[in-house]
Every structure is written in structure tokens, then in C-alpha cells.
Image (spheres, rainbow, N blue to C red):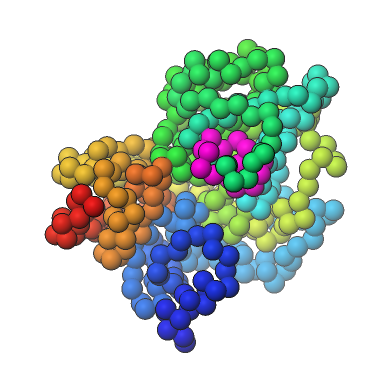
């Protein structure tokens, strides 16, 4: 086998440089641990950016996917297939929504959600000048449509002009949203918990107020639960904490347990007055392979009470992080919901991530100065304790090196 550095050099020559990768080549995973090509073990508190909800090497999920590979992987949506029928049944049951469209990614789920909202408004009044209110500091994906509703100029500037008809309001500021509403507004789009922007949960009064505005003005509420959904926050979907059901919801990441799949959900009211044959489609979306994965993921979630376990572990993780915030001056606060947590730092967060890697801990960043934690939902208290030992060591290592003010 080629040496690690040679392999990374090869990757850098062949792959488009859109990621600044860490100098680690991961080879395998087991439970909540990952292993690199040198055999080093890492406690994974990133889970592939919230994807590996069931950890690594889940034999039930692996067996379901392997079995489907031998049966049938693709048919196109010109035909029915059994796995996606079962997956759809699980999806509508778990979400409380009535219709689902399977996509290949979270970004595509956002694209479909936006199209459904615009089509609904067009069917209602025949106009094509409708606008969408999205949130500042948000992140919804990197295609042109998803970038257009992402409230961060840093991601948008080089790709303008973007999709017209998008206005931005301040997250958790209901008056800011009210000020953007007029007769053209067809939808309000937000993450129930902002992820990339820095781990900001919606305040209950804000989300309830948004719902009331939508009902008052016949505006559709679109919730992006790509990162915060699928048990991550202690309910199957984060909005269930608030009792605020969306009209359209985007989901991805954990829904496939590692297999690339996303979805957008609609209520029957929206579905029957929006997208029809010819309006939307996907060659690969809802193929038998991902259908088998989604089917198995939902069945494991229900049988093993995964969201409830995540809620319990989230309480313990919050307590542990609060204790660390009291211990280290560089930690200025904690925020999050369930197993979607962030520590606000006043030192370079990237340095802490690298120091944690040295200790065998994988964590990631969010919002510039936030250390983000998205562990597999199957973690136990012992794994939270192990994380705390490794993160303390990483933070103390910075002190030893005299890097506090770097």
C-alpha cells in the first residue's frame, strides 16, 4: 500500500479542491469509533456531519443493503419498487406528514420543497411573482436554488445572480419576519435548529409565532430538518419538541444511516395543490437500494427507541459540557438540543479540532467559533465521559503549548 502522504498527494492531484481535508485517511468504523489506515482509533463525535446515526457496522442495516444489492438497485421512477414503498410508509408514519418524495441529498430536498411551495402559490392565485422569507445565518445547501435561500453572503457572493424572490429575516426575531411579509409571500423557510450557522435552536415563541403568521396569511411553513431531524434532538423530528407541524419539511443525513438519500415531506393539503406529474422528478431518487436502507433505519429507530435514547444522552451531554464550560475560561457557553451541541470558544476552534484529533477524538466546527458535536445516536454515558477526557486533554494541550492567545 502506498504511504499515507503519497495517497493524500494523489487525492489532491485528482480531486477538485473544494475541501480542506484533515491529514487522516479513514479506513473502517465500528460502533462509535473510526480507524485510520495507521490503525489509530478515534471516538467519533461528528458522525459524518450527522449522517451515521446508528454508528458504524450495524449488522442489520448492512445486511439489508447487501441483500438489496443482489436483488435490484435501480429501476427508475417509471415503476414501483417494494423497498421504497415500505420506506415511504415508515416516513409518513414517523413524520406525521402525508406525502414524501425521496431525493439523493439534503440540497435536493430543499430544491423540491421550494418548488412545491411556489407551485402551491401558483395554483392558488395564478401569479409567478411569489417570494420566500428565509433566515439570516442559515445554511440550506450549495446548489443555486439552495444557496439562494441560504442567509450567508460568504457562500453566495461568487455565484450571483441567484434565484430572485428571496428575503431574509433575523432568526428568533418575530418582528423581523413580520416586516418582510407582504402579499407576495408564499413561504417561510428555516432550520428548526440552525446547524452550520452555529447551533442555534429556534425559541418556542418564535416558531409558534411563525406558524401563526403562516396560518393568518396562507403562507407555507417549510422546516429544514436535514441535520436536526431523525432523532438527533431527542424527538424523531425537532419540530415535535415545539408542537409546530410544518407544511413542508426537508430531511436527509441520518435517514439512510450512511446511504446517500434525502426526502421532502408535504401535508396532503399542499401535496394535492402543488407538484403533479411533469413538475418534478429524479432518476435515482427513491431507488430500491436507498429504499431498503431507509426502511431498515426507521424500523431500528422504532424498535430500539433511538430518539428517546438520544434525548436521554443529550441531557447527560449537556450536563458534561456545562461542567467543562465552568472549568475552561476559553469556553464562553453551550447551546444546542439533544445530541446536536455546540461549545462557543474564544480561541481558534480549528486548533482545538486538530488537538482533539491528536487525542483520538473527532469533532467539527460551526459558525466560525463553535465546536460542534453530532455523535452517533447510539452513544452511551461512557462515550460522553471518554469525549470529556479527550477534549480536556486537547484544551490543556493548548495551554501547555502556550497557544491560548494564538
Tell me what residue is drawn at x 30 percent, y 41 percent: 344
Q: In this view of the protein, can residue 212 be seen by the observer?
A: no
Q: Position of residue 256 (x, y in %)?
A: 58, 54
Tell me what residue is drawn at x 85 percent, y 53 percent: 78
Q: Position of residue 125 (x, y in %)?
A: 81, 19
Q: Quadrant of residue 264?
A: top right
Q: Is 179 left or right of 219, judged from the image as shown?
A: left
Q: Is residue 315 magenta?
A: no
Q: Position of residue 240 (x, y in %)?
A: 50, 31
Q: Nearer the viewer, residue 129 or 231?
A: 129
> Where 138 falls versus 262 (above or below)?
above
Bounds of the magenta span? 141-155
Q: Is residue 151 magenta?
A: yes
Q: Nearer the viewer, residue 166 or 123?
A: 166
Q: Quadrant of residue 327?
A: top left
Q: Is 313 left or right of 85, judged from the image as shown?
A: left
Tell me what residue is drawn at x 17 percent, y 60 percent: 401
Amino acid at each position: 500500500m502506498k504511504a499515507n502522504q503519497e495517497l493524500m498527494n494523489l487525492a489532491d492531484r485528482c480531486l477538485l479542491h473544494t475541501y480542506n481535508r484533515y491529514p487522516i485517511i479513514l479506513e473502517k468504523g465500528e460502533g462509535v469509533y473510526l480507524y485510520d489506515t495507521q490503525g489509530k482509533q478515534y471516538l467519533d463525535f461528528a458522525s459524518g456531519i450527522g449522517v451515521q446515526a446508528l454508528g458504524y457496522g450495524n449488522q442489520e442495516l448492512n445486511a439489508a443493503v447487501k441483500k438489496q444489492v443482489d436483488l435490484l438497485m435501480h429501476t427508475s421512477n417509471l415503476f414501483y419498487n417494494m423497498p421504497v414503498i415500505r420506506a415511504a410508509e415508515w416516513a409518513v408514519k414517523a413524520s406525521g406528514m402525508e406525502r414524501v418524495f425521496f431525493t439523493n441529498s439534503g440540497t435536493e430536498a430543499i430544491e423540491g420543497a421550494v418548488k412545491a411551495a411556489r407551485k402551491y402559490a401558483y395554483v392558488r392565485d395564478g401569479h409567478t411573482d411569489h417570494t420566500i422569507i428565509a433566515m439570516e445565518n442559515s445554511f440550506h445547501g450549495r446548489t443555486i436554488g439552495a444557496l439562494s435561500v441560504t442567509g450567508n453572503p460568504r457562500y453566495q457572493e461568487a455565484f450571483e445572480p441567484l434565484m430572485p424572490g428571496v428575503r431574509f429575516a433575523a432568526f428568533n426575531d418575530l418582528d423581523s419576519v413580520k416586516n418582510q411579509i407582504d402579499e407576495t409571500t408564499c413561504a417561510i423557510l428555516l432550520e428548526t435548529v440552525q446547524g452550520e450557522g452555529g447551533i442555534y435552536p429556534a425559541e418556542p415563541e418564535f416558531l409558534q409565532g411563525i406558524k401563526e403568521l403562516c396560518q393568518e396569511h396562507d403562507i407555507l411553513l417549510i422546516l429544514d430538518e436535514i441535520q436536526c431531524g431523525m432523532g438527533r434532538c431527542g424527538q424523531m423530528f425537532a419540530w415535535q419538541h415545539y408542537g409546530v407541524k410544518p407544511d413542508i419539511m426537508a430531511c436527509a443525513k441520518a435517514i439512510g444511516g450512511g446511504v446517500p438519500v434525502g426526502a421532502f415531506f408535504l401535508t396532503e393539503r399542499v401535496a394535492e395543490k402543488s407538484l403533479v406529474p411533469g413538475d418534478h422528478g429524479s432518476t435515482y431518487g427513491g431507488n430500491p437500494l436507498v429504499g431498503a436502507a431507509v426502511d431498515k433505519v426507521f424500523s431500528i429507530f422504532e424498535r430500539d427507541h433511538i430518539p428517546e435514547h438520544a434525548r436521554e444522552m443529550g441531557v447527560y451531554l449537556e450536563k458534561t459540557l456545562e461542567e467543562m464550560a465552568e472549568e475552561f475560561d476559553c469556553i464562553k457557553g453551550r447551546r444546542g438540543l439533544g445530541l446536536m451541541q455546540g461549545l462557543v470558544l474564544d480561541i481558534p476552534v480549528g486548533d482545538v479540532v486538530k488537538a482533539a484529533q491528536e487525542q483520538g477524538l473527532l469533532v467539527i466546527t460551526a459558525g466560525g467559533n463553535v465546536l460542534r458535536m453530532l455523535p452517533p445516536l447510539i452513544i452511551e454515558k461512557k462515550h460522553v465521559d471518554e469525549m470529556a477526557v479527550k477534549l480536556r486533554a486537547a484544551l490543556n494541550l493548548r495551554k501547555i503549548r502556550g497557544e491560548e492567545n494564538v
